[in-house]
Image (spheres, rainbow, N blue to C red):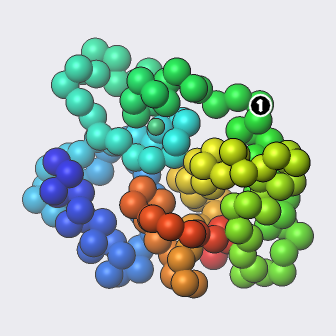
Amino acid sequence: MSFCRCIVRGRDLLQGVRRIPAPAWTNRFGVVVRSKICARCGRSFDWRKKWEACWDEVRFCSQKCRRSRPSELDARLEHAISTLLERRAAGGTICPSEAARAVADDWRPLLERTRMAARRLAAQGEVEITQGGRVVDPDTARGAVRIRRRR
Ligand SMILES: [Zn+2]
């Protein structure tokens, strides 16, 4: 199914359409693809046979994410991102490290968690993740990213 998803994503990007996560959507072949956003890492993941009986309750993409479920610190990181963006002029961006710094003095170990928080907020439609001023897919973006309020 990842093949189909790539095509749909590519088409969405071409049309400038933001990918809004939904429990189910139809790809270009008319196949219903069920996917969710992981409550931990904020990446999308697709339905799997092993989740047939409990798909409604599935919240995490992997064992790793399930073991390290979101904590109060993750909520604070999300809050820091929102607060910093509110203070920024319209269209302004922040670096994930700014949000991490707002939460802890020892902020470097929090960078990946901050990126996860940004992905979750992007999935909720609150923010966009950009590289070089262009919105990128939070699932696949590599390297330095910036965060801005959704336009
Ligand atoms: Zn995950």
User: Dot 1: within a 10 Å radius of its alpha carbon, few (fewer than 14), some, or many (20 or more) residues?
Assistant: few
In the figure, 76 relative to 108: above or below?
above
Name the quarter where the C terminus is drawn.
bottom right
Which residue position is annotated with label 1? 72
> Residue flagged by tag 1: what amino acid is it?
Glu
Nearer-the-camera pick, 97 or 48? 97
* Residue 90, image quadrant: bottom right
For the point 83% across and 81% down, the residue is 89
- Percent across and percent down for residue 123 are 53, 53
* Disc 1 secondary structure class: helix
Nearer-the-camera pick, 95 or 125? 95
For the point 27% across and 34% down, the residue is 47
On the rendered structure, is 44 left or right of 109? left
In the figure, 54 relative to 115: above or below?
above
* Residue 137 visible in the shown view: yes
Nearer-the-camera pick, 62 or 22? 62
- Percent across and percent down for residue 41 are 52, 42
* Residue 74, image quadrant: top right
For the point 27% across and 74% down, the residue is 11
In the figure, 49 relative to 147: above or below?
above
For the point 80% across and 42% down, the residue is 76
* Residue 124 visible in the shown view: no
On the rendered structure, is 58 left or right of 10? right
On the rendered structure, is 113 left or right of 50? right
